[in-house]
Image: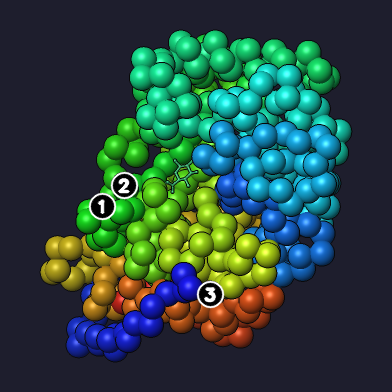
Amino acid sequence: LNDANPKVTEPAKPISDKFLRANVILSSQKMGIVGENFLGFSYEKSILSTPHFQADNKALIRFFSNLGTGVLRIGGNTVNQTEWHPEGEGYIPFKTSPSDIERLAGFLRAVNWKVIYGLNAATSLEYETANEADFVLQILGDRLESFEVGNEPDLYHKNKLRPENYTYDHFLFDWDYFTSAIKYVSLNPVFSGPSSAHYYAKYTIPFASDRGNKINQLTHHYYRANGKSPDATMDLLLAPDRKLILSLIEMNKVTKLNNIPNGYRMVETNSFYNGGADGVSNAFGSALWLIDYCFTLAKYGAVGANFHGGGKIGGYTPISSHRNGQIVGAEAIYYGMLLFSKMLPGEILNSKIKLKHDNKENFLKTHSVIKSDGEIATVLINTSRIHSIKTKVIYHKSISSATAMLLTAPHLESTKGFQFAGSSIEINGQWSPVNISFIFNSKYALEVSVPSGSAILIQAN
Ligand code: BDP
């Protein structure tokens, strides 16, 4: 494999001589929910013509199943380059053949996940797209959550799929044109959209009012910045993003206002676009980013996030693989997803952090959920490169036992050596947690030390 990571020698993790200290105080106030299908993957449509999604890909099945259930989204730029090929025998690049869909159906049934399926509404003829949709509906049945009609229409003009003067109104016209053709051929197709790249104010927000009664879910994309720009650093990724929050507030508002039944979803997302930033998107810090990012989305009403990837090593992919479907490994993003998945489903509890040291900088982030059986899951994330943080968690109700699982790597910039609960994920997808420690200090509080550049999941009952 020639695109493998160059070997980097990693400096030893610096050891801080002084601990920082903080208290985390939980309250019974609910801040939103994280549903069991919050997590998802997003793959390029081109993946369908490779042997990835099929019922005999046992390793990939395990990688998905480790996270519970979720939503797979087939989309990306290759949606706009792929044609329906009803006579095709399958495995043909940029053509989707019936057998490619049948293999996808087998995979979805094996993992019990659903799919949001992207259709070409940019470079294909409407009757071809409608015929593809009809076939997909018949074969995927209840595994199909919705059709996404086009990928990132707000960039059609930039990507030379439409003329320079293409606007949102033109997009509405295209969307109606393609969805009408699909409705003409199939009974009750379900749509989501608009799956726009970043122009939420110009596309996603008005779409909620203009077509909110024609979709089951409002969808949008998020990346922090261009992965090929020098700004794409770990420090930027770990810093708060005010613009993201503003967009979430707006999307949450219009989703509710227009009664969109399945809410709004970040249907394609990851750290940095253009494939990610090598050394950042595939480094351990991005696992810590992911956990906090998912909670930020949930607190502002999003129902889920689909982490984009597939294939290529060195970028943002959660699971790296060869073109023949063989897995290379679990990347940093996947480890973040794995920890987060253990907190689902639940209601988010309000919590606050009180720093007990003089260092004004706060490296600690925390989120808690309460599950239906009363278990409280708390994640403590320490993004400091040098300081450990002695943290006291103070509960709003009494607890009788607690376990802790550490998510760690040599340091934030490490692109390998990840472990969760003392176990790395094997290439066959197996994860065997071996190091779950039991902690218990008093009826209402416990104390743990969160090592620099790590996260701890505490499950208290
Ligand atoms: C998005 C596209 C996706 C790309 C991704 C990227 O939908 O196909 O792979 O950006 O640039 O805009 O990484």
State how the image is colored: rainbow
Per the image, label 1 sits on a secondary structure element best described as: loop
Residue under circle 1? 229
* Depicted 228 relative to depicted 386: above or below: above
Is 416 or 216 nearer to us in this picture?
416
Residue 324's x, y, as percent?
Answer: 68, 65
Can I make out residue 143 in this image? Answer: no
What residue lies at 48% left-to-right and 73% top-to-bottom?
Answer: 2
Residue under circle 3? 1
Instruction: Give me the disc on residue 225.
Output: 2
CA neighbours of label 2 inside 10 A, class few (<14), some (14 to 19), many (20+): some
Q: Amino acid at mark 1?
A: Ser
Q: Amino acid at mark 2?
A: Ala
Is 379 or 220 nearer to us in this picture?
220
Number of numbered tags placed on the structure image: 3
Q: Is residue 62 left or right of residue 449?
A: right
What residue lies at 54% left-to-right and 84% top-to-bottom?
Answer: 422
Residue 372's x, y, as percent?
Answer: 66, 52
Quadrant hosting residue 135? top right
